[in-house]
Amino acid sequence: MNEHTLSTEHDHSGSVFKPLYVTRVAVTGGDSGHARATGRARSADGALALELRLPEELGGDNPGPNPEQLFAAGYAACFQGALSLLARQHLLDPGAITVEATVTFGRDPADGGYQLRADLVVTWPGVDRATATPLLAQATALCPYAKMARHGIPATIALAG
């Protein structure tokens, strides 16, 4: 096995968090008068470089990607990857798996601030519900985006300098 290949059997040891990949993305510029991210997002390695836009539903007039779309893409991709890994382990073809994420931005009734909600729908042609259901549960436990959606993540916020 390639030392860089992810595997639930081989990349876990010990009881402390073990970083396997780190990325950095900076967002600069944009209009902050509406409490929504616009501007430019760029990853440290340059692989991601895009303009963020305010959705029309929130008063934007220029279509383009927004933070909720980026989160939905990440969540769907991560879950699809976890489910594909499990499918291969069970000798099932993961090629037909589609994961659609719906992310909703709205008001948090607890404090009047903002809140996200996320829903995933998995389409897996050729695999019956009895076979797919336990694998979806396992993928939910394996996918770090699903863990984050259920339990939050350790996070810090600090002022630079």
Image: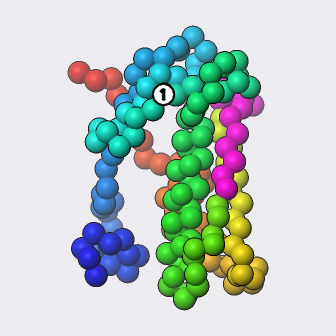
State the image quarter where residue 26 is shown.
Answer: top left
Report helix, strand or loop for mark 1. strand
95 vs 120, nearest the viewer: 95
Q: Amino acid at mark 1?
A: Glu
- Is 45 located above or below residue 1 in the figure? above
For the point 70% across and 24% down, which residue is it? Answer: 56
- Residue 157, x across and y down, in percent: 39, 31
- Residue 46, x across and y down, in percent: 31, 39
Q: Which residues are magenta?
A: 100-114
Determine if residue 78 is in view. yes
For the point 66% across and 52% down, which residue is it? Answer: 101
Residue ranking furthest to the top: 33
127 vs 154, nearest the viewer: 127
Circle 1 is placed at which residue position?
51
Determine if residue 151 is in view. no
For the point 56% across and 64% down, which residue is it? Answer: 80
- Residue 11, x across and y down, in percent: 32, 73
